[in-house]
């Protein structure tokens, strides 16, 4: 990770101080069982030089149907500390009646807002722990058709509370052409239902390189991902993380084969600051003012 992530070089000088103190970044994964969420988390953490240090206990206060678990790793780069947490939500969409299966996830996201607000209201605000969810990867089944009602419902319920990043699960099960068509269908469904997915802002004063990098990332959304926690051997004898087929190997870390590298780059390097900022300045702030209005303040 040290070699290629570069979060220590986050561009925004304003954030230098908080960066030096160390910061938290939390990613949530949501999607039906068997779509490769746990595998993708492992794939993400396996790219770190550090094994995940600590498995945090599942949140005790929410014994809902959707069990929520998180795993964290402390990563240090050029003296900058990052606590990366990935929250897994097994059980989503697995019930006979999936009506409101988004609810426990929304509750979890809002309870993290609550905990942040409570810390902000303390007299001593020196040590605020930011456990808010900064990005939510939503796994779409690789049907090649369009979004399912459960996908639309989840995104509609959550898009004002969290930065949604749709991903096509198990992209190795589709051909390149099927992926392109599927991406277009998904984007038009998302537009049709007026769902807001996270879009990195492009600033006028960005240099050409940054603009190109952002556009390249944006062009891949919804990211077609492939996860694998094992190494396989390619025809030309390389050992790579990937999945083996009779006709060849799909390489996780090869940008020609899938969008995993681009997704990781967006999350942990290029757009980490924007994801944090949008969570704080827009999503959290809207939730907070709505809550105060509801309380009659
Ligand atoms: P989860 O229920 O969403 O957490 O899914 P898992 O990560 O447990 O994966 C379910 C099954 O799908 C396992 O057998 C994985 O090996 C397999 N799997 C995971 N990721 C991929 C992928 O990208 N492509 C393919 N073809 N299979 C995958
Ligand atoms: Mg799982």
Image (tube, grey):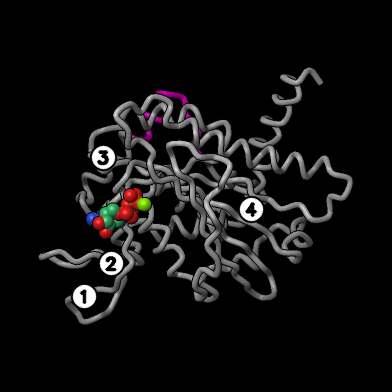
The reply to whether dot 1 and dot 4 touch (C-beta < 8 Å) is no
Q: Are marks 2 and 1 in contact (CB under 8 Å)?
A: yes
Rendered residue at 89%/45% (across/down): 123
C-alpha span from label 4 to label 2? 30 Å
Q: Which residue is mark 2?
A: 242
Q: Earlier in the sequence, mark 3 or mark 4?
A: 3
Which residue in the structure is indicated by mark 4?
273
Q: Which residues are magenta?
A: 186-197
- Kindly identify the residue that appears in the image at 26 percent across and 46 percent down: 179
SS at mark 2 in the image: strand
Residue 212 placement (x, y as % from top left): 50, 55
Q: Residue at x 77, y 56 (%)?
A: 14
Q: CA distance from mark 2 to mark 1?
A: 9 Å
The answer to whether the residue bearing label 2 lies less than 8 angstroms from the nearest atom of ligand 1 is no
Q: Mark 1 falls on what kind of element?
A: loop
Q: Quadrant of residue 102?
A: top left
Q: Residue at x 58, y 42 (%)?
A: 61
């Amino acid at each position: 990770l040290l070699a290629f992530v570069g979060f220590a070089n986050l561009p925004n000088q304003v954030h230098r101080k908080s960066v030096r103190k160390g910061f938290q970044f939390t990613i949530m994964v949501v999607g039906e069982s068997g779509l490769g969420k746990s595998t993708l988390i492992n794939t993400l953490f396996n790219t770190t030089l550090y094994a995940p240090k600590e498995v945090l206990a599942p949140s005790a206060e929410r014994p809902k149907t959707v069990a929520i678990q998180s795993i964290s790793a402390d990563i240090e780069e050029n003296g900058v500390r990052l606590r990366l947490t990935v929250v897994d939500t097994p059980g989503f969409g697995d019930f006979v009646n999936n009506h409101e299966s988004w609810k426990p996830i929304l509750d979890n996201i809002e309870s993290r807002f609550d905990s942040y607000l409570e810390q902000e209201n303390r007299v001593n605000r020196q040590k605020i722990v930011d456990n808010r969810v900064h990005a939510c990867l939503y796994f779409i089944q690789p049907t090649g058709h369009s979004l399912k009602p459960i996908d639309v419902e989840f995104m509609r319920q959550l898009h004002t509370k969290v930065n949604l990043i749709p991903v096509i699960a198990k992209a190795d099960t589709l051909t390149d052409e099927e992926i392109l068509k599927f991406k277009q269908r998904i984007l038009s469904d998302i537009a049709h239902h007026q769902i807001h997915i996270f879009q990195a802002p492009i600033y006028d004063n960005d240099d050409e390189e940054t603009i190109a990098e952002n556009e390249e990332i944006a062009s891949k959304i919804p990211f077609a991902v492939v996860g694998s926690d094992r190494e396989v051997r390619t025809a030309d004898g390389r050992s790579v993380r990937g999945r083996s087929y009779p006709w060849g190997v799909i390489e996780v870390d090869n940008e020609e084969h899938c969008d995993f590298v681009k997704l990781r780059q967006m999350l942990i390097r290029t757009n980490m600051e924007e994801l944090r900022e949008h969570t704080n300045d827009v999503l959290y702030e809207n939730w907070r003012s709505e809550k105060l209005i509801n309380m009659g303040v």
